[in-house]
Amino acid sequence: MENRWNSGIHDRKLKEQICEIGRRVYDKGFAAANDGNISIRVGDNEVLCSPTMICKGFMTPDDICAVDMNGDQLAGKRKRTSEVLLHLAIMKERPDVKAVVHCHPPHATAFAVAREAIPQCVLPEVEVFMGEVPLAPYETPGGQEFASTVVPFLKATNTIILTNHGTVSFGKTLEEAYWKTEILDAYCRILILAKQIGGITYLGEQKSRELIDLKKRLGFDDPRFHNESCDLCGNSAFRDGYKEDAPQQKAFEKAPDYPGYLQKPTYDSGNGNGNIQLPAGMNMDDLVKMITDQVVSAMGK
Protein backbone atom coordinates (compact mmCIF):
# COMPACT_ATOMS: atom_id res chain seq x y z
CA MET A 1 0.00 0.00 0.00
CA GLU A 2 1.59 3.25 -1.17
CA ASN A 3 1.25 6.43 0.87
CA ARG A 4 2.78 9.84 1.42
CA TRP A 5 5.97 8.30 2.87
CA ASN A 6 6.42 6.34 -0.40
CA SER A 7 6.60 3.13 1.55
CA GLY A 8 4.21 0.51 2.88
CA ILE A 9 3.64 -2.55 4.98
CA HIS A 10 5.49 -4.78 2.49
CA ASP A 11 8.61 -2.60 2.15
CA ARG A 12 11.49 -5.04 2.66
CA LYS A 13 14.13 -2.33 3.12
CA LEU A 14 12.28 -0.90 6.10
CA LYS A 15 11.87 -4.37 7.56
CA GLU A 16 15.63 -4.83 7.17
CA GLN A 17 16.18 -1.53 9.00
CA ILE A 18 14.09 -2.80 11.92
CA CYS A 19 16.19 -5.97 11.98
CA GLU A 20 19.42 -3.94 11.90
CA ILE A 21 18.33 -1.76 14.82
CA GLY A 22 17.31 -4.95 16.62
CA ARG A 23 20.83 -6.32 16.17
CA ARG A 24 22.36 -3.11 17.51
CA VAL A 25 20.05 -3.15 20.54
CA TYR A 26 20.89 -6.80 21.21
CA ASP A 27 24.64 -6.43 20.65
CA LYS A 28 24.72 -3.44 23.02
CA GLY A 29 23.08 -5.49 25.75
CA PHE A 30 20.00 -3.26 25.69
CA ALA A 31 17.60 -6.19 25.24
CA ALA A 32 18.13 -9.61 26.78
CA ALA A 33 16.37 -12.61 25.22
CA ASN A 34 12.98 -11.38 23.93
CA ASP A 35 13.11 -7.90 25.50
CA GLY A 36 12.29 -4.71 23.64
CA ASN A 37 10.33 -3.73 20.56
CA ILE A 38 10.83 -1.51 17.52
CA SER A 39 8.45 0.20 15.12
CA ILE A 40 8.32 2.54 12.14
CA ARG A 41 5.31 4.30 10.69
CA VAL A 42 4.86 3.62 6.95
CA GLY A 43 1.51 5.26 6.22
CA ASP A 44 -1.38 7.27 7.60
CA ASN A 45 -2.73 4.14 9.24
CA GLU A 46 0.10 1.58 8.90
CA VAL A 47 3.02 0.75 11.18
CA LEU A 48 5.66 -1.94 10.88
CA CYS A 49 6.75 -3.46 14.19
CA SER A 50 8.75 -6.28 15.70
CA PRO A 51 6.81 -9.39 16.74
CA THR A 52 6.34 -10.71 20.24
CA MET A 53 8.51 -13.43 21.75
CA ILE A 54 11.54 -13.04 19.51
CA CYS A 55 15.13 -12.04 20.24
CA LYS A 56 15.80 -8.68 18.62
CA GLY A 57 19.27 -9.80 17.58
CA PHE A 58 17.97 -12.66 15.44
CA MET A 59 15.04 -11.15 13.56
CA THR A 60 14.67 -11.45 9.80
CA PRO A 61 12.49 -9.28 7.51
CA ASP A 62 9.97 -12.11 7.25
CA ASP A 63 9.39 -11.86 11.03
CA ILE A 64 8.23 -8.23 10.94
CA CYS A 65 4.52 -7.48 11.49
CA ALA A 66 2.24 -4.66 10.37
CA VAL A 67 -0.53 -3.06 12.42
CA ASP A 68 -2.95 -0.18 12.02
CA MET A 69 -3.01 2.83 14.33
CA ASN A 70 -5.41 1.02 16.66
CA GLY A 71 -3.01 -1.89 17.09
CA ASP A 72 -4.95 -4.38 14.97
CA GLN A 73 -2.63 -6.63 12.99
CA LEU A 74 -2.64 -6.15 9.22
CA ALA A 75 0.15 -8.48 8.11
CA GLY A 76 2.85 -10.83 9.35
CA LYS A 77 3.17 -14.51 10.10
CA ARG A 78 4.09 -13.76 13.73
CA LYS A 79 1.93 -12.02 16.34
CA ARG A 80 2.72 -8.34 16.84
CA THR A 81 4.39 -7.17 20.04
CA SER A 82 2.00 -6.65 22.94
CA GLU A 83 3.60 -3.27 23.68
CA VAL A 84 2.92 -1.74 20.27
CA LEU A 85 0.21 0.41 21.91
CA LEU A 86 3.03 2.39 23.56
CA HIS A 87 4.50 3.12 20.13
CA LEU A 88 1.12 4.08 18.70
CA ALA A 89 0.34 6.43 21.60
CA ILE A 90 3.56 8.29 20.85
CA MET A 91 2.86 8.47 17.12
CA LYS A 92 -0.69 9.72 17.68
CA GLU A 93 0.45 12.52 19.98
CA ARG A 94 3.50 13.38 17.89
CA PRO A 95 2.79 13.29 14.12
CA ASP A 96 6.46 14.14 13.49
CA VAL A 97 7.53 10.82 15.03
CA LYS A 98 7.99 8.01 12.54
CA ALA A 99 10.08 5.53 14.56
CA VAL A 100 10.10 4.23 18.16
CA VAL A 101 12.60 2.05 20.03
CA HIS A 102 11.74 0.53 23.41
CA CYS A 103 14.30 -1.54 25.29
CA HIS A 104 16.01 -2.04 28.66
CA PRO A 105 19.49 -0.46 28.53
CA PRO A 106 21.00 -1.48 31.88
CA HIS A 107 22.43 1.83 33.11
CA ALA A 108 19.38 3.89 32.20
CA THR A 109 17.14 1.16 33.59
CA ALA A 110 19.07 1.39 36.86
CA PHE A 111 17.77 4.97 37.10
CA ALA A 112 14.32 3.62 36.23
CA VAL A 113 14.23 1.13 39.10
CA ALA A 114 15.72 3.64 41.54
CA ARG A 115 13.38 6.37 40.22
CA GLU A 116 16.37 8.67 40.28
CA ALA A 117 16.17 11.99 38.46
CA ILE A 118 18.91 12.35 35.85
CA PRO A 119 21.09 15.43 36.48
CA GLN A 120 21.43 18.16 33.89
CA CYS A 121 24.21 20.72 33.32
CA VAL A 122 26.86 18.00 33.45
CA LEU A 123 27.72 16.70 29.97
CA PRO A 124 27.66 18.97 26.86
CA GLU A 125 26.40 16.31 24.44
CA VAL A 126 23.45 15.50 26.68
CA GLU A 127 22.49 19.16 27.07
CA VAL A 128 22.53 19.74 23.32
CA PHE A 129 21.19 16.47 21.93
CA MET A 130 18.87 15.30 24.68
CA GLY A 131 17.96 17.71 27.47
CA GLU A 132 15.85 16.74 30.45
CA VAL A 133 14.70 13.12 30.56
CA PRO A 134 11.38 12.54 32.38
CA LEU A 135 10.40 9.40 34.27
CA ALA A 136 6.94 8.13 33.35
CA PRO A 137 5.05 6.42 36.19
CA TYR A 138 4.93 2.64 36.38
CA GLU A 139 2.06 0.66 34.89
CA THR A 140 1.82 -3.02 33.97
CA PRO A 141 3.23 -3.32 30.42
CA GLY A 142 1.11 -4.22 27.43
CA GLY A 143 -2.19 -2.37 27.82
CA GLN A 144 -3.50 1.08 27.01
CA GLU A 145 -2.94 2.29 30.58
CA PHE A 146 0.75 1.49 30.17
CA ALA A 147 0.85 3.30 26.81
CA SER A 148 -0.84 6.37 28.31
CA THR A 149 1.84 6.86 30.98
CA VAL A 150 4.12 8.63 28.49
CA VAL A 151 1.52 11.00 27.01
CA PRO A 152 1.97 13.90 29.50
CA PHE A 153 5.67 14.13 28.62
CA LEU A 154 5.66 13.79 24.85
CA LYS A 155 5.60 17.46 23.84
CA ALA A 156 8.95 18.24 25.43
CA THR A 157 11.24 15.27 24.80
CA ASN A 158 12.18 12.40 22.49
CA THR A 159 13.42 10.16 25.30
CA ILE A 160 11.52 8.85 28.33
CA ILE A 161 12.50 6.53 31.16
CA LEU A 162 9.76 4.08 32.10
CA THR A 163 9.81 3.62 35.86
CA ASN A 164 10.73 0.06 36.92
CA HIS A 165 10.83 -0.98 33.28
CA GLY A 166 13.22 0.55 30.74
CA THR A 167 13.33 3.34 28.18
CA VAL A 168 11.53 4.51 25.06
CA SER A 169 13.05 6.85 22.49
CA PHE A 170 11.65 8.13 19.23
CA GLY A 171 12.34 10.30 16.22
CA LYS A 172 11.95 10.79 12.49
CA THR A 173 14.08 7.75 11.66
CA LEU A 174 14.94 4.44 13.29
CA GLU A 175 18.59 5.48 13.64
CA GLU A 176 17.64 8.72 15.37
CA ALA A 177 15.38 6.87 17.80
CA TYR A 178 18.12 4.33 18.53
CA TRP A 179 20.80 7.00 18.99
CA LYS A 180 18.73 8.63 21.73
CA THR A 181 18.78 5.34 23.63
CA GLU A 182 22.53 4.96 23.17
CA ILE A 183 23.25 8.53 24.32
CA LEU A 184 21.03 8.09 27.38
CA ASP A 185 22.57 4.81 28.49
CA ALA A 186 26.12 6.07 27.94
CA TYR A 187 25.34 9.14 30.06
CA CYS A 188 23.76 7.07 32.83
CA ARG A 189 26.84 4.82 32.85
CA ILE A 190 29.10 7.87 33.18
CA LEU A 191 26.98 9.17 36.07
CA ILE A 192 27.16 5.83 37.88
CA LEU A 193 30.95 5.65 37.41
CA ALA A 194 31.36 9.26 38.56
CA LYS A 195 29.34 8.49 41.68
CA GLN A 196 31.74 5.65 42.48
CA ILE A 197 34.78 7.94 42.37
CA GLY A 198 33.30 10.83 44.29
CA GLY A 199 30.42 12.51 42.50
CA ILE A 200 29.66 14.84 39.61
CA THR A 201 30.74 18.40 38.84
CA TYR A 202 28.08 20.72 37.48
CA LEU A 203 28.88 23.22 34.76
CA GLY A 204 28.74 26.88 35.70
CA GLU A 205 25.80 29.05 34.79
CA GLN A 206 27.53 30.80 31.91
CA LYS A 207 28.78 27.57 30.31
CA SER A 208 25.39 25.92 30.77
CA ARG A 209 23.72 28.87 29.08
CA GLU A 210 26.22 28.70 26.21
CA LEU A 211 25.24 25.08 25.58
CA ILE A 212 21.55 25.98 25.45
CA ASP A 213 22.42 28.82 23.05
CA LEU A 214 24.24 26.28 20.89
CA LYS A 215 21.26 23.96 20.98
CA LYS A 216 19.03 26.76 19.76
CA ARG A 217 21.41 27.68 16.94
CA LEU A 218 21.49 24.05 15.80
CA GLY A 219 17.70 24.09 15.49
CA PHE A 220 16.85 21.71 18.34
CA ASP A 221 13.84 22.50 20.49
CA ASP A 222 13.88 22.57 24.28
CA PRO A 223 11.22 23.35 26.93
CA ARG A 224 13.55 25.96 28.38
CA PHE A 225 13.07 28.06 25.23
CA HIS A 226 9.37 28.48 25.96
CA ASN A 227 8.75 28.19 29.71
CA GLU A 228 9.94 30.95 32.00
CA SER A 229 9.49 28.75 35.07
CA CYS A 230 12.06 26.21 33.82
CA ASP A 231 15.32 26.78 35.62
CA LEU A 232 18.52 26.30 33.67
CA CYS A 233 19.48 22.83 34.89
CA GLY A 234 16.92 21.64 37.41
CA ASN A 235 14.36 18.92 36.68
CA SER A 236 11.38 21.17 36.19
CA ALA A 237 10.26 21.13 32.55
CA PHE A 238 7.83 18.26 33.18
CA ARG A 239 6.37 19.27 36.53
CA ASP A 240 2.85 19.48 35.09
CA GLY A 241 3.13 15.92 33.79
CA TYR A 242 3.81 14.32 37.16
CA LYS A 243 0.57 13.29 38.86
CA GLU A 244 2.58 11.94 41.76
CA ASP A 245 5.64 13.61 43.25
CA ALA A 246 8.32 14.40 40.68
CA PRO A 247 11.45 12.25 40.95
CA GLN A 248 14.23 13.79 43.02
CA GLN A 249 18.00 13.53 42.94
CA LYS A 250 18.98 11.27 45.82
CA ALA A 251 22.25 9.77 44.61
CA PHE A 252 23.72 13.07 43.41
CA GLU A 253 24.15 16.54 44.81
CA LYS A 254 21.32 18.85 43.78
CA ALA A 255 21.96 20.98 40.71
CA PRO A 256 22.85 24.65 41.28
CA ASP A 257 19.93 27.06 41.41
CA TYR A 258 20.48 28.99 38.19
CA PRO A 259 17.76 31.25 36.72
CA GLY A 260 15.78 30.04 33.72
CA TYR A 261 17.01 30.44 30.17
CA LEU A 262 14.36 33.10 29.49
CA GLN A 263 15.24 34.98 32.66
CA LYS A 264 17.97 37.55 32.98
CA PRO A 265 21.23 35.71 33.76
CA THR A 266 23.57 36.46 36.58
CA TYR A 267 27.24 36.71 35.71
CA ASP A 268 30.14 34.61 36.81
CA SER A 269 32.50 36.32 39.21
CA GLY A 270 35.58 35.05 37.36
CA ASN A 271 36.61 32.40 39.85
CA GLY A 272 34.15 29.83 38.48
CA ASN A 273 32.53 29.33 41.87
CA GLY A 274 29.95 32.07 42.26
CA ASN A 275 28.15 35.10 40.93
CA ILE A 276 28.73 38.81 41.25
CA GLN A 277 27.18 40.16 44.41
CA LEU A 278 25.77 43.57 43.57
CA PRO A 279 26.05 46.40 46.10
CA ALA A 280 22.82 47.28 47.88
CA GLY A 281 20.55 49.43 45.72
CA MET A 282 22.45 48.70 42.48
CA ASN A 283 21.06 46.66 39.59
CA MET A 284 23.03 44.99 36.82
CA ASP A 285 22.48 47.85 34.35
CA ASP A 286 23.92 50.32 36.85
CA LEU A 287 26.91 48.07 37.39
CA VAL A 288 27.58 47.75 33.65
CA LYS A 289 27.36 51.54 33.23
CA MET A 290 29.71 52.10 36.16
CA ILE A 291 32.31 49.69 34.75
CA THR A 292 31.99 51.21 31.26
CA ASP A 293 32.51 54.71 32.65
CA GLN A 294 35.60 53.55 34.51
CA VAL A 295 37.04 51.90 31.39
CA VAL A 296 36.41 55.00 29.26
CA SER A 297 37.94 57.19 31.94
CA ALA A 298 41.04 54.97 32.16
CA MET A 299 41.47 55.01 28.36
CA GLY A 300 41.50 58.81 28.39
CA LYS A 301 44.41 59.04 30.81
Image (cartoon, rainbow, N blue to C red):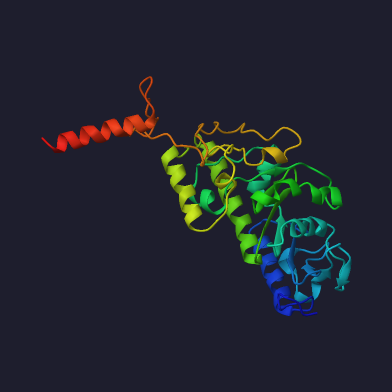
Rendering coords of residue 109 (x, y %):
68, 46
In the rendered view, would you say 258 is above or below 70?
above
Rendering coords of residue 166 (x, y %):
72, 49
In the rendered view, would you say 97 is above or below 226?
below
Residue appearing at x 54%, y 39% in the figure: 233
Quarter of the figure that contains the C terminus: top left
Rendering coords of residue 195 (x, y %):
54, 37
Side of 26 where 255 appears, left or right: left
Residue 173 picture quarter = bottom right
Residue appearing at x 34%, y 30% in the figure: 286
Q: Is residue 204 visible?
A: no
Q: Is residue 197 visible?
A: yes
Looking at the image, the residue that sits furthest to the left is: 301
Residue appearing at x 50%, y 53% in the figure: 215
Q: Nearer the viewer, residue 13 or 52?
A: 13
Side of 269 where 51 appears, left or right: right
> Count the marks: how many?
0
Residue 227 picture quarter = top right
In the rendered view, would you say 105 is above or below 38?
above
Q: Nearer the viewer, residue 273 or 268?
A: 268
Residue appearing at x 75%, y 74% in the figure: 60
